[in-house]
Structures are given as C-alpha cells and as structure tokens.
Image (cartoon, grey):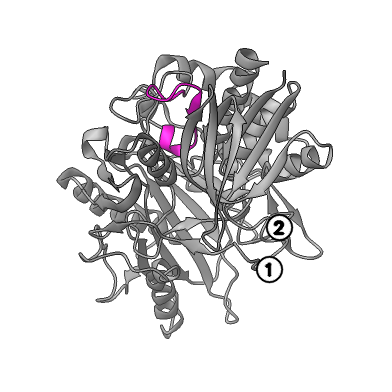
Amino acid sequence: MSFRLAVVGGGMAGLETAVALAERGAAEIEVIERGGSARRDHIHWDAKTYPGDEKTQRWRSDGWGIGGGLSERLGGRSLCYHGVLLGIEEEALKGWPSEWVETFADENAGYAGFLASLSSEFPELADRDFSVEARRIGLRHVPQAARLDTEKHRFCAYSPLGAALALREEGRLTISQGGIERLRRADGKWMLDVFDRSGNSDSRGGFDACVLSASAIGNAQIVARTLGCDVETTITDHFSMGVLARLPAGPALAELRHAGLWAGYLPRAEIGANLFVQEMAPLEEGDRMVKVAVVAEQGLSPEDYSRLSVMIDDGRTSDTYIDTRIPLRDRRRLAGLRDELADVVRQIAQGDVADVTGSWGGFAVPPPRGETEPGRSKAQWQAHDNALQTLLDQPKPGHMAFYDFPYGAFEHEACTHPVGGEGDLATTLELELEKLPDVFLVGPGSFPRMGAANPAITIMVMARALGGRLAERYL
C-alpha cells in the first residue's frame, strides 16, 4: 500500500519536505496551499500579482508586526527575498539540541551540502573579489542563491518551487488550493477539514501522516483547532533597522548590479547581529548613496520572547493574540546597534557624517499600542522612504538618516513550536508533535533560537532532513 502524506503549506519548508520525500521513493504526496498557484518563477522575474497572492493578517496584538502579515503564495517568501544563505551562528546554536547542531555541521546533509547542491546554478554563492574600499572596512562575502540576467536586469533567487512543479508534472506529487481548519483522526488515518477562498468546506482523508508547514503562527492555529483547546507559546522575529547615507563622490565599495545583491556584510556576533552593506546607484551630481542594514536576534532565550495565544471557542479559533515583549537589555542593545550603523557609515566616508534623521525617526520598539490593522503592508517602509527623501532634500552630501522595521514586521516569525520544547506544541527531535502522532511541524516555528542569520538555509536544511526521515520511517 502506498504511503500518503499531506503537506499543509506550500512555502519553503513545505515544498522542500515534499520534494525531498518525492525524490526518495514512491509516495502519494499532496501539498495544500491557501494562496494562489499561478506563479512559476521568482517574483523579480514574474512581478504580476495573481489572485491569492494577497498578504493576510490573522491576529491581534499590542503592537506586533505593524505592516506585517502572512504572505500566501505557492513558493512562500523565498519568492520575494534575496536568497541570502547564512547559517545560524555558533553562539545561538547553543540553544539547539545537539542532534540538530550535528545535522547542520554535516558535510552532506547540512549547510555545506545544501550550498554545494546549488553552487552550479547560482553563481552569487561563490566568493567575489572585493575592492580596496570593501576590504578596508572588512566586508565579507554574502552567499546568495541568486542569479542575475544582466541584459534584462532581472534577479532570481533559489526556491524549491521549480523542483516541486517539475515533480507535479511527473505525477509524483499534487498541489491543491485551500486552507486547513483542523485535522481529524478517522480509521487510523488523518482527515483534513479544508476551506476555499469563498469559505466553502470540504474534507480530504486517508493520509498516513501530515506535515504542518503553514507558518509559525499558522501551525499553532491549526494545532489549537485540532486539539480543541487554547494554546499559548513563544514567538519572536528579527529586529531590523538601517541607515541611508549620502556621501561625496569617491571610490565605490562595489558596483551596483542589482538592488537584490549585497556588496558584503559585517558580522557582529558579540551583539547578535549582521550588518549588510550596499553601494546604491549614485545621484546625478555624482554623490554616493550607501545603505547599511542590520538584522539582529531578539533575546537570548525563550524567556525574552513575545507570547502567542490561540484561543478556541466551540472548536474554532476565536482569537489569536500576540503579547509583544521587549526586555530592557534588548532596548539598550538596539541603541548600540544604531551606533554600529553610524560607525560603519563613517568608516566608509573616512570622516564625520551628520545625522539628519529628524523627529519622525527613532525606533518604534514596540510600535504604539493598539490592534494591528489589516491593509498596512507598506507601513514598515515609511521610515525608509522618509530617510531617503530627507537625504535627497539635503543641499550637499555628508549626511545619513536612519529607518527601522517595527518588531514583528520583518516576517521572520519563529520559535512557536521549538524542537525539544514543552507544552501543547512540544515536538520530538524528529519534529513529530508529541500530542498528535504522525503529525510533523517544520519551518521557522521549529527554531529554539533564531540567531542573527537569515533563516532560509536553516528552514530548508531542516525540511530536507525531515523529508529524508519520513522516507526512512514510512517507505
């Protein structure tokens, strides 16, 4: 009898799991994705907006993720970011089970093997020669699973979408559209209650196992509805902020080939941060434009994270609420990160640069209290655009302006069902939910600590590992 698997969520984690299993043996795999399925390639190469691409929000909060939201599209967020593949730093990995630390370090199954599998297709993974100016400030190469069409100035980053669509054409997996209300056990198999975009309900059954890879928040909602009880857990996101600088004409750090490609980055492990540097296109008068953006880990342990509560009424989600918590030591660290950004700008300029951020700047951490409003997907860019306009309004170069993303708006929601954790969302080291046998949770929600790294490579290595373990267990 064939093994049947339901994969809930067609983002990076879901598609990597499905592809890894489909490539290992005969199985009936159905990927169920709530968002649209028309896109076939990276969003920079296919910039259309399709029905189902809309960003949605399904929570209330006291300030979490103003302007954020859950993207619903086949391929997930890998379709719209830069393909940055930096693994979790050694210090942050101390919060992970040793078994997973060993997996990440494995030459074949870990970070190195994943990068090697993509290196021939994505030349931006390979080290590049740095300019004298880049070496002077200590820039390091940013490994990006990306390729650039220089003639059409198009940028494409890696996504498992291509492999998944090819396997679908071969009949080795299916992809269907729908949202998941809950899972139900019937005759020793898993049934899924599915709804479409019009709210019509249906059921799919006969699955031997399920992989929940919807999102860190979505997974918690589905589990709460399946268990029929309130669930409370941790949740976190990266801090992200940056500075734009207008400097006098001079030697460039690196040629701007595309806005999706970074000139390099500066690790700051001692403060849990990575600083990404980009030489932007110069202004008509020759002034240099430089961007320095920082991604920083929030907190040093789950005690520092915010809290996610999913509350159930009559078996349905009645409320999903995020209690935003930022420890005092994190607030102080954010002030230090602003100093780090300013210092990098001054190193690039080799002199003083005036801060003209203005009264609209500063860091909204957390943002003003009040319920997160739907439809504010561009809100997090307002400070960035204000910073840029402020620099353009200056009569001469030698100025910088800061911007920030509100905590929870960077869309790296994580640590809701950490591997080796406790409570209703506790999973085994194999990512199996302890309270629901044959149900597995994967994605950034499985992280015990996120570190400062872009989470993409860790998500995909974990998903590939899960696909392999499902093959060993069921096939």
Q: What is the quadrant of residue 402 in the picture?
A: bottom left
Q: Main secondary structure of the magenta part?
A: loop
Q: Is residue 439 magenta?
A: yes
- Badge 2 amino acid: Arg
Residues shaded magenta:
432-446
In the image, 100: left or right of 115? left
In the image, 416: left or right of 278? left
* Residue with the mark numbered 2: 39
Image position, residue 74 (x, y; %): 63, 51
In the image, 363: left or right of 180? left
Image position, residue 208 (x, y; %): 59, 24
Residue sitting nearer the eye, 344 or 177: 177
* Residue with the mark numbered 1: 48
Q: Residue at x 69, y 38 (%)?
A: 126
Q: Secondary structure at mark 2?
A: loop
Residue 59 visible to the viewer: yes
Q: Residue at x 34, y 56 (%)?
A: 59
- Residue 237's disc is none
